Amino acid sequence: MKKEYQLGKVIVVADRGMMSKKNIEVVENSNYEFIVGKSIKQIKK
């Protein structure tokens, strides 16, 4: 994506509906920065 659109920085933003384990692994392995939303109930204290 960076090369195709000549982007300097790509940040993936995903809501909790996109938070499958597989999707998180793909984003983590892509070398992109990312922001992932979680519900309050999912956050450990």
Image (spheres, rainbow, N blue to C red):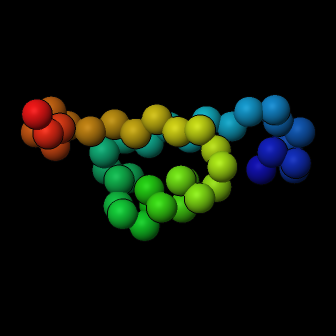
In which quadrant is the C terminus drawn?
top left
Residue 31 percent coordinates (x, y): 66, 49
- Position of 2 with respect to 22 (left or right) is right
Residue 3 percent coordinates (x, y): 88, 48
Q: Residue at x 53, y 53 (%)?
A: 28
Q: Is residue 26 above or below residue 37?
A: below
Quarter location, residue 5:
top right
- Position of 23 with respect to 16 (left or right) is right
- Position of 41 with respect to 14 (left or right) is left
Residue 43 percent coordinates (x, y): 17, 38
Q: Is residue 25 above or below residue 45?
A: below
Residue 34 percent coordinates (x, y): 52, 39
Q: Residue at x 89, y 39 (%)?
A: 6
Q: Residue at x 26, y 39 (%)?
A: 38
Q: Residue at x 36, y 63 (%)?
A: 21
Quarter location, residue 33:
top right
- Position of 42 with respect to 12 (left or right) is left
Q: Is residue 18 above or below residue 9?
A: below
Marker count (numbered): 0
Q: Give the farthest residue toward the bottom.
A: 22
Q: Nearer the viewer, residue 8 or 4?
A: 8
Q: Give the farthest residue toward the front.
A: 45
